[in-house]
Image (spheres, rainbow, N blue to C red):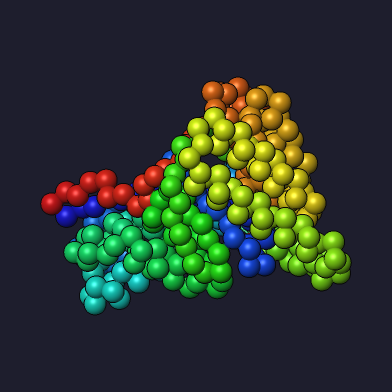
Amino acid sequence: MRVLASAPAKIILFGEHSVVYGKPAIAAAIDLRTYVKAEFNENGRIRIEAKDIRTPGLTVSFSEDQIYFETDYGKAAEVLSYVREAINLVMEEAGQRKGVTVSITSQIPVGAGLGSSAAVAVATIGAVSRLFGLELDKSEIAKLGHKVELLVQGASSGIDPTVSAVGGFLYYQKGSFESLPVVELPIVVGYTGSSGSTKELVAKVRKNYEEMPEIIEPILNSMGKLVEKAREVILAEYDKEIKFKLLGTLMNINHGLLDALGVSTKSLSDLVYASREAGALGAKITGAGGGGCMYALAPGKQSEVATAIKIAGGMPMVTKISKEGLRIEEVEK
Ligand code: MEV
């Protein structure tokens, strides 16, 4: 028997960083997927084949007579710990151990803040649990995905595996999740090609907060209110055009507030401004900042914005919201 499952990447639409201070955030699944194929093997071992994991920064260097290629194997290797823990947890859940071969292909760049680790964990749990004949619903899969993150990285809000398993829009506050109706946002994600350290960026905001709470607290409060406003807009009965316009404005404000917290970089802001100049209604950092990705809301202008992001030095990914989370693509008996 062979099972092919896929799980989507995520972006934080609104509320990164302020969410660490108990404010709400809204995240969404996007249509970039990680595919995991699982089958039993005869040798009793766990075998992981990573066929296509997109790591940032292929470095090419030249000496007189040679060309050297380097890529970030460390990041790719990290992904594999998520796969291993995911398989172990499913086997525990099934109460049996068997040799399993999983092979992975992914459209999600690793280390870009798009939840590639959670997607690989969720797709692995989906494929392997089906292989073992377990009937897990999406919230159980999300919980196992969260457990994998806790085992591998020590701390996690659970946003990434939950979005990846459930799909669509998710409103999150202090550990609880609510699915919101999906607004089909035509977006372009722009990857700077470098990755920031979430831990260091969260610590930087914390330091500023502790040194000057009277300045930082109002910014965090504004961010919290902005997320509530975005939720209202998403739930309202407005026309699509009005929703896009309001959400675009909120994105721009959110970007400014993140910049004020000190988590933007020149390359992120270059991609944000290039997108707006090319006709995006809104553009902002998504995730921790310090590198990683931004996204732009660009109805009717996705290809113009993608070109502008490319010219500004980023890697554009034209995509849309994925209503679906984990998907079982194929089951071969
Ligand atoms: C990172 O994707 C989002 C942050 O808010 C950190 C976190 O919520 O754990 C910066």
Please say whether residue 247 is visible from this viewpoint.
yes
In the image, 75 versus 185, the foreground residue is 185
Residue name at image x 45 percent, y 51 percent: 180
Q: Is residue 202 left or right of residue 117?
A: right
In the image, 104 versus 217, the foreground residue is 217
User: If the picture is divided into quarters, which one holds ligand 1?
Assistant: bottom right
* Quadrant location of the N terminus in the rendered image: bottom left
Please say whether residue 88 is visible from this viewpoint.
no
Residue name at image x 48 percent, y 40 percent: 237
Quadrant of the rendered image containing residue 208: bottom right
Locate residue 327, reporting x and y percent: 31, 49
Q: Is residue 165 left or right of residue 114?
A: left
Locate residue 185, reporting x and y percent: 50, 36
Quadrant of the rendered image containing residue 43: bottom left
Locate residue 284, reporting x and y percent: 67, 42
Q: Is residue 158 left or right of residue 268?
A: left
Residue name at image x 51 percent, y 36 percent: 238
Locate residue 47, reporting x and y percent: 33, 60
Residue 125 sits above or below residue 247 on the image: below
Q: Residue furthest front?
A: 237
Residue name at image x 28 percent, y 74 percent: 93
Q: Is residue 89 left or right of residue 147?
A: left
Q: How many marks?
A: 0
Residue 42 sits above or below residue 268 on the image: below
